[in-house]
Image (cartoon, rainbow, N blue to C red):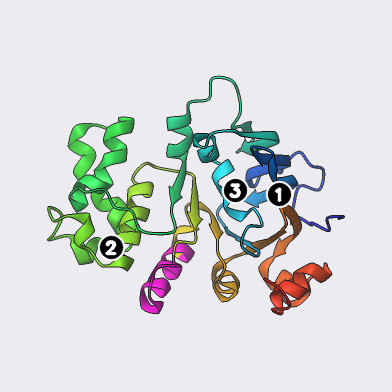
Protein backbone atom coordinates (compact mmCIF):
# COMPACT_ATOMS: atom_id res chain seq x y z
CA UNK A 1 0.00 0.00 0.00
CA UNK A 2 1.44 3.37 -0.97
CA UNK A 3 1.29 6.15 1.59
CA UNK A 4 -0.04 9.54 0.55
CA UNK A 5 1.16 11.21 3.73
CA UNK A 6 1.81 14.90 3.56
CA UNK A 7 3.34 17.23 6.12
CA UNK A 8 2.90 20.95 6.66
CA UNK A 9 6.63 21.51 6.93
CA UNK A 10 10.08 19.95 6.58
CA UNK A 11 9.76 18.63 3.07
CA UNK A 12 13.50 18.03 3.09
CA UNK A 13 13.05 15.33 5.75
CA UNK A 14 15.52 16.88 8.21
CA UNK A 15 13.00 18.72 10.37
CA UNK A 16 12.39 22.44 10.50
CA UNK A 17 13.40 24.75 13.32
CA UNK A 18 9.74 25.16 14.26
CA UNK A 19 9.21 21.40 14.68
CA UNK A 20 9.11 20.10 18.25
CA UNK A 21 9.07 16.42 17.23
CA UNK A 22 10.37 14.93 13.98
CA UNK A 23 9.64 11.27 13.28
CA UNK A 24 11.66 9.69 10.49
CA UNK A 25 10.95 6.34 8.75
CA UNK A 26 9.80 4.88 12.05
CA UNK A 27 8.88 1.20 12.38
CA UNK A 28 7.75 -0.52 15.57
CA UNK A 29 7.17 -4.17 16.47
CA UNK A 30 5.46 -5.99 19.32
CA UNK A 31 7.23 -9.32 19.01
CA UNK A 32 6.71 -10.40 15.40
CA UNK A 33 3.73 -8.04 14.87
CA UNK A 34 4.69 -4.84 13.11
CA UNK A 35 2.48 -2.05 14.44
CA UNK A 36 4.02 0.95 12.61
CA UNK A 37 5.38 1.07 9.06
CA UNK A 38 7.86 3.78 7.98
CA UNK A 39 6.02 6.64 9.68
CA UNK A 40 7.45 10.11 9.00
CA UNK A 41 5.78 13.07 10.68
CA UNK A 42 6.74 16.58 11.77
CA UNK A 43 4.96 18.00 14.81
CA UNK A 44 5.02 21.82 14.96
CA UNK A 45 5.88 23.47 18.26
CA UNK A 46 3.18 25.23 20.27
CA UNK A 47 0.28 23.74 18.40
CA UNK A 48 -2.17 20.87 18.89
CA UNK A 49 -1.61 17.87 16.61
CA UNK A 50 -4.34 15.23 16.59
CA UNK A 51 -3.78 11.57 15.74
CA UNK A 52 -6.89 9.91 14.34
CA UNK A 53 -7.72 6.54 12.83
CA UNK A 54 -9.60 3.32 13.58
CA UNK A 55 -8.81 1.17 16.62
CA UNK A 56 -5.56 -0.73 16.26
CA UNK A 57 -4.10 1.56 13.61
CA UNK A 58 -1.02 2.49 15.66
CA UNK A 59 -2.01 5.87 17.16
CA UNK A 60 -1.19 5.03 20.78
CA UNK A 61 1.91 3.09 19.75
CA UNK A 62 3.21 6.16 17.94
CA UNK A 63 2.32 8.45 20.84
CA UNK A 64 4.04 6.26 23.42
CA UNK A 65 7.13 5.99 21.25
CA UNK A 66 7.78 9.72 21.60
CA UNK A 67 8.73 9.35 25.27
CA UNK A 68 9.86 5.71 24.94
CA UNK A 69 7.05 4.41 27.13
CA UNK A 70 6.73 1.43 24.80
CA UNK A 71 10.11 0.20 26.00
CA UNK A 72 8.41 -0.80 29.25
CA UNK A 73 6.71 -3.58 27.25
CA UNK A 74 8.66 -6.82 26.79
CA UNK A 75 9.75 -7.99 23.33
CA UNK A 76 9.39 -4.70 21.47
CA UNK A 77 11.77 -3.09 19.01
CA UNK A 78 11.92 -0.16 16.64
CA UNK A 79 13.73 1.08 13.59
CA UNK A 80 14.01 4.69 12.49
CA UNK A 81 14.42 7.95 14.33
CA UNK A 82 12.52 10.33 16.57
CA UNK A 83 13.98 13.79 17.21
CA UNK A 84 12.90 16.01 20.09
CA UNK A 85 13.80 19.60 19.22
CA UNK A 86 16.46 18.29 16.87
CA UNK A 87 18.00 15.70 19.18
CA UNK A 88 17.47 11.95 18.99
CA UNK A 89 15.56 10.42 21.87
CA UNK A 90 17.49 7.19 21.19
CA UNK A 91 20.94 8.65 21.75
CA UNK A 92 23.16 6.41 23.88
CA UNK A 93 23.05 7.52 27.48
CA UNK A 94 19.63 9.19 27.17
CA UNK A 95 18.17 9.74 30.65
CA UNK A 96 14.68 8.25 30.37
CA UNK A 97 13.44 9.91 33.56
CA UNK A 98 14.47 13.29 32.17
CA UNK A 99 12.99 12.47 28.75
CA UNK A 100 9.63 11.63 30.34
CA UNK A 101 9.82 14.84 32.35
CA UNK A 102 10.26 16.87 29.16
CA UNK A 103 7.63 14.83 27.33
CA UNK A 104 4.71 14.56 29.75
CA UNK A 105 1.99 11.93 29.41
CA UNK A 106 -1.71 11.94 30.27
CA UNK A 107 -3.53 8.64 29.93
CA UNK A 108 -6.99 7.61 28.81
CA UNK A 109 -8.43 7.24 32.29
CA UNK A 110 -7.58 9.64 35.11
CA UNK A 111 -4.97 8.01 37.33
CA UNK A 112 -4.32 10.23 40.35
CA UNK A 113 -1.92 8.80 42.91
CA UNK A 114 -3.39 7.73 46.27
CA UNK A 115 -2.06 10.95 47.75
CA UNK A 116 -3.34 14.42 48.50
CA UNK A 117 -4.06 16.86 45.70
CA UNK A 118 -0.92 18.79 46.69
CA UNK A 119 1.29 15.69 46.76
CA UNK A 120 -0.02 14.51 43.40
CA UNK A 121 1.23 17.69 41.75
CA UNK A 122 4.38 17.92 43.86
CA UNK A 123 5.43 14.34 43.12
CA UNK A 124 7.32 15.06 39.89
CA UNK A 125 9.17 18.18 41.05
CA UNK A 126 10.29 16.33 44.18
CA UNK A 127 11.44 13.34 42.15
CA UNK A 128 13.26 15.47 39.59
CA UNK A 129 14.67 17.98 42.10
CA UNK A 130 13.13 20.91 40.29
CA UNK A 131 13.83 24.11 42.20
CA UNK A 132 14.31 24.69 45.90
CA UNK A 133 12.10 23.05 48.50
CA UNK A 134 10.62 26.41 49.50
CA UNK A 135 9.49 26.94 45.87
CA UNK A 136 7.36 23.81 45.83
CA UNK A 137 4.15 25.42 47.04
CA UNK A 138 4.35 28.07 44.33
CA UNK A 139 5.12 25.44 41.69
CA UNK A 140 2.08 23.38 42.69
CA UNK A 141 -0.17 26.44 42.64
CA UNK A 142 1.06 27.49 39.21
CA UNK A 143 0.54 23.99 37.76
CA UNK A 144 -3.00 23.85 39.14
CA UNK A 145 -3.73 27.30 37.71
CA UNK A 146 -2.44 26.25 34.28
CA UNK A 147 -4.66 23.20 34.47
CA UNK A 148 -7.65 25.45 35.31
CA UNK A 149 -8.16 23.62 38.60
CA UNK A 150 -6.79 25.99 41.24
CA UNK A 151 -10.02 27.82 42.05
CA UNK A 152 -11.82 24.51 42.57
CA UNK A 153 -9.25 22.92 44.89
CA UNK A 154 -7.25 25.72 46.55
CA UNK A 155 -9.00 25.11 49.89
CA UNK A 156 -8.81 21.31 49.55
CA UNK A 157 -5.15 20.63 48.83
CA UNK A 158 -4.86 18.12 51.68
CA UNK A 159 -7.79 16.05 50.41
CA UNK A 160 -7.13 12.89 48.35
CA UNK A 161 -6.87 13.41 44.61
CA UNK A 162 -9.10 10.38 44.19
CA UNK A 163 -11.96 12.29 45.87
CA UNK A 164 -12.26 14.66 42.91
CA UNK A 165 -14.74 14.18 40.07
CA UNK A 166 -13.60 12.41 36.92
CA UNK A 167 -13.06 15.64 35.01
CA UNK A 168 -11.21 17.21 37.92
CA UNK A 169 -9.04 14.12 38.26
CA UNK A 170 -8.03 14.38 34.60
CA UNK A 171 -7.14 18.04 35.03
CA UNK A 172 -5.18 17.06 38.16
CA UNK A 173 -3.23 14.59 36.02
CA UNK A 174 -2.55 17.36 33.51
CA UNK A 175 -1.38 19.62 36.37
CA UNK A 176 0.88 16.80 37.58
CA UNK A 177 2.49 16.63 34.14
CA UNK A 178 2.80 20.42 33.86
CA UNK A 179 4.55 20.69 37.24
CA UNK A 180 7.51 18.85 35.67
CA UNK A 181 8.07 21.71 33.20
CA UNK A 182 7.57 19.62 30.05
CA UNK A 183 8.01 20.97 26.55
CA UNK A 184 5.70 18.41 24.94
CA UNK A 185 2.44 17.03 26.33
CA UNK A 186 1.11 13.68 25.07
CA UNK A 187 -2.54 12.79 25.68
CA UNK A 188 -4.02 9.39 24.89
CA UNK A 189 -7.81 9.67 24.60
CA UNK A 190 -7.94 12.01 27.64
CA UNK A 191 -11.69 12.61 27.41
CA UNK A 192 -12.98 9.13 26.63
CA UNK A 193 -14.06 8.50 30.23
CA UNK A 194 -15.49 12.00 30.81
CA UNK A 195 -18.96 13.47 30.46
CA UNK A 196 -19.62 16.23 27.86
CA UNK A 197 -19.19 19.09 30.34
CA UNK A 198 -15.87 17.76 31.65
CA UNK A 199 -14.77 17.08 28.07
CA UNK A 200 -15.44 20.69 27.14
CA UNK A 201 -13.37 21.91 30.09
CA UNK A 202 -10.42 19.74 29.06
CA UNK A 203 -10.69 20.82 25.42
CA UNK A 204 -10.75 24.50 26.38
CA UNK A 205 -7.74 23.89 28.60
CA UNK A 206 -5.73 22.27 25.80
CA UNK A 207 -6.44 25.20 23.47
CA UNK A 208 -5.07 27.53 26.16
CA UNK A 209 -2.04 25.36 26.91
CA UNK A 210 -0.82 25.31 23.31
CA UNK A 211 0.38 28.89 23.85
CA UNK A 212 3.18 27.37 25.95
CA UNK A 213 3.38 23.69 25.08
CA UNK A 214 3.45 21.35 22.10
CA UNK A 215 0.43 19.05 22.39
CA UNK A 216 -0.15 15.71 20.67
CA UNK A 217 -3.51 14.06 21.29
CA UNK A 218 -4.86 10.67 20.26
CA UNK A 219 -8.62 10.79 19.81
CA UNK A 220 -11.34 8.62 18.30
CA UNK A 221 -13.66 11.62 18.40
CA UNK A 222 -13.46 13.28 15.00
CA UNK A 223 -15.46 16.27 16.23
CA UNK A 224 -12.93 16.76 19.01
CA UNK A 225 -10.05 16.70 16.55
CA UNK A 226 -11.80 19.23 14.31
CA UNK A 227 -12.46 21.50 17.31
CA UNK A 228 -9.05 21.64 18.94
CA UNK A 229 -6.34 20.33 16.59
CA UNK A 230 -4.34 22.72 14.42
CA UNK A 231 -2.89 19.77 12.51
CA UNK A 232 -4.26 16.25 12.13
CA UNK A 233 -2.58 12.99 11.12
CA UNK A 234 -4.62 10.01 9.89
CA UNK A 235 -3.17 6.56 10.50
CA UNK A 236 -4.45 3.31 9.01
CA UNK A 237 -3.01 -0.19 9.44
CA UNK A 238 0.14 1.24 10.97
CA UNK A 239 0.81 3.68 8.14
CA UNK A 240 0.60 7.46 8.16
CA UNK A 241 -1.82 8.02 5.31
CA UNK A 242 -2.19 11.78 5.43
CA UNK A 243 -1.11 14.73 7.55
CA UNK A 244 -1.91 18.40 7.22
CA UNK A 245 -3.80 21.33 8.63
CA UNK A 246 -6.99 20.10 10.22
CA UNK A 247 -9.36 22.20 8.11
CA UNK A 248 -7.73 20.97 4.90
CA UNK A 249 -7.66 17.33 5.96
CA UNK A 250 -11.31 17.32 7.05
CA UNK A 251 -12.70 19.25 4.08
CA UNK A 252 -10.32 18.35 1.24
CA UNK A 253 -8.59 15.05 2.07
CA UNK A 254 -6.01 14.01 -0.49
CA UNK A 255 -6.33 10.25 0.02
CA UNK A 256 -9.49 8.24 -0.58
CA UNK A 257 -8.86 6.25 2.62
CA UNK A 258 -8.97 9.45 4.64
CA UNK A 259 -12.22 10.48 3.01
CA UNK A 260 -13.70 7.03 3.63
CA UNK A 261 -12.81 7.19 7.32
CA UNK A 262 -14.06 10.75 7.80
CA UNK A 263 -17.37 9.97 6.12
CA UNK A 264 -17.91 6.84 8.22
CA UNK A 265 -17.50 4.24 5.46
CA UNK A 266 -15.15 2.33 7.76
CA UNK A 267 -13.65 2.67 11.23
Q: Which residue, given by chain and number where applicable, does mark 1 sit on?
A: 41
Pick out the residue farthest to the top: 93
Earlier-in-chain disc, 2 versus 1: 1
Q: Residue at x 53, y 25 (%)?
A: 94
Percent across and percent down for residue 158 are 12, 52
Q: Can I make out residue 118 in this image?
A: yes
Depth check: give the residue in front, 107 or 5.
107
Is 195 in the magenta?
yes
Q: Return the x and y of residue 183 as percentages of the image width and height.
A: 49, 44
Task: Decide: few, some or many residues near mark 2? Use Cα within 10 Å; few <14, some 14-19, many ≥20.
Answer: some
Is 105 placed left or right of 156 in the picture? right
Quadrant location of the C terminus in the rendered image: bottom right
Task: Give the magenta range.
Answer: 191-207
Q: Residue furthest front?
A: 32
Relative to residue 144, is residue 223 drawn left or right?
A: right
Which comes sooner in the sequence, label 3 or label 2?
A: 3
Along the horizontal axis of the image, is 189 left or right of 130? right
Q: Nearer the viewer, mark 2 or mark 1?
A: 1
Separation of disc 1 and disc 3 at Cα?
14 Å
Disc assigned to residue 149: 2
Asked which secondary structure carries label 2, the reply is: loop
* Element on which disc 3 rests: helix
Kindly identify which residue carries mark 3: 61
Whether residue 139 is visible here, answered yes or no, is no
Q: Gap between marks 3 and 2, in whole Å? A: 30 Å
Residue 85 in magenta?
no
Residue at x 82%, y 43% (from the top left corner): 12
Amino acid sequence: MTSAATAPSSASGSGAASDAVSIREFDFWYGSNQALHRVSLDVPARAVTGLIGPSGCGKSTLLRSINRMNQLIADTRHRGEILLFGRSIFEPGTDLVDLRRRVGMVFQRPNPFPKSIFDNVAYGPRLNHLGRRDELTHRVEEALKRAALWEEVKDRLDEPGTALSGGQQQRLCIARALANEPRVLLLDEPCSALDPIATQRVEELLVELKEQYTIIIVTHNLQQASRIADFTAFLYLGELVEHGRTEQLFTRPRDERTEAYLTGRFG
